Amino acid sequence: MFVKIDRLEFLKKLRIVEKAISENKVKPIIGCVYLKAKDGKITFYGTNLEITMVSTAEALVLEDGVVAFQPQLIDEYVKELSEKELSLKVQGNGLVIETEDSSTEFSTMNAEEYPKIEYSYDEAKSWFTIEGQKLLSVFEKVKYSAATGSENLAMNCIRLEASDKIARFITTDTYRMTYLEQEIDTDCKLNISIPLNSADAITKLLKVEPLETIKVLFNKNYIYFISGETEIICRIIELTFPNYRGILEGATYNKRFVIKNEEFSKILKRVQIFVKNNTDAKNGALLEFSDKRLLISGTSSIAKVVEDIKIDYEGSPLRISLNVKFLLEFMQNLDNEKNIIIELKEANSSVKIIEEGNDKYIYIVMPLALKD
């Protein structure tokens, strides 16, 4: 292989596909970027077998070829160069990167061992488009409440369901659930689970590479995110997702209070200082409602906090214990200047939180056990 390519374009494409790579001691080739030079283009591949990122750049291809290399050192080196153009040559077991003033050789791995990445979305019947920053916002607003770890694999995902020009994104770890609706441009039918690790990789990419219009397609067991010369391919989770509709539609509430998001967030952050290491109930605080007032109390091993707040409360008195961290993770995604509505029922019943006037973004959280 022998190609010449713009240095910044090389770095850009390298950093895109790096987001799909993770260290694999059993199969080290997975920790590599794979380059393929052919027909005046150079294509970059990165994969961990669950998610694959592919991005193509124009280049002067003087000799077709392939190469696989670990990207970290090359990224750091190329970043410090000042030349506009790079020459990439495969010589024996090395990749030589040349500029007008320097020539540096990097070790490579056997490109023939790189996983064969074969995919096709030509037959996809379900698809919609979404702006990259909107997709980033959606993922950020829901992914924190997904289950972590392989023991809850069916919930270790972002659930995506689409119909009637609405895409619904849902996550849950059984202790809480986040539901978000997003209008889309096509009336497609989708019911798939995107692995959380894949959603995290896409989030990291979109934070540094704001892809414009992304076409989201589903074909067989894969979901594709296509934008220009960049393609992301994710294997979906083929396990039954919990019945979230039963939770949304079945819960009833007879108590509610309204408070400005910024005010409530500041109070909860103060309380969290004391309860984040509580040995009885980590992040747990006691909320006591009565006659337009709310007392929030929490303890650490050496101190206790009590916040007394005037609120707009409707309902009979109630004592309930909630995870402060869980509340803040949802509230940080809301407008500080707007009110939030919190609906409750009993000390052992779920709690519903929304931003006032927005029922398209819903948070359901389960209470903690009350201590006598």
Image (cartoon, helix red, strand yellow):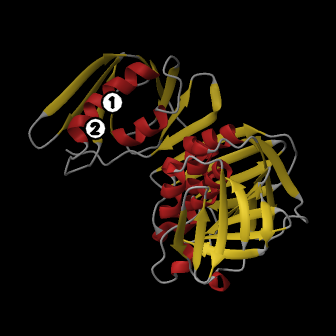
User: Is the Cβ of the residue at disc 1 closer than 8 Å to that at disc 2?
Assistant: yes
The residue beneath circle 1 is 268
Q: Closer to the camera, 1 or 357?
A: 1
Amino acid beneath label 1:
Leu
SS for callout 2: strand
Q: Work out whether mark 1 precedes mark 2 in sequence or the reverse, and give the earlier one.
A: 1
Quarter of the image that includes the C terminus:
top left
Residue neighbourhood size for the residue with mark 2, other residues' Cα within 10 Å, grouped as few (<14), some (14–19), many (≥20): many
Q: Position of residue 77 (x, y in %)?
A: 49, 57
Amino acid beneath label 2:
Ala
Which residue is at 56% across, 40% downward? 141
Q: Position of residue 123 (x, y in %)?
A: 91, 66
From the viewer's perspective, is residue 59 above or below residue 343? below
Q: Hey, which residue is sitting farthest left in the picture?
A: 302
Q: Marks 1 and 2, Cα distance to the nearest angstrom?
A: 9 Å
From the viewer's perspective, is residue 142 above or below residue 340? below
Q: In terms of image quadrants, where is residue 312?
A: top left
Tell me if I can see residue 238 in this picture: no
Which residue is at 59% across, 64% downward? 97
Which residue is at 41% across, 42% downward? 326
Q: Which mark is residue 285?
A: 2
SS for callout 1: helix
Q: Which mark is residue 53?
A: none
Residue neighbourhood size for the residue with mark 1, other residues' Cα within 10 Å, grouped as few (<14), some (14–19), many (≥20): some
User: As drawn, is 205 to the left or to the right of 227?
Assistant: left
From the viewer's perspective, is residue 16 above or below residue 219? above
Tell me if I can see residue 61 in this picture: yes
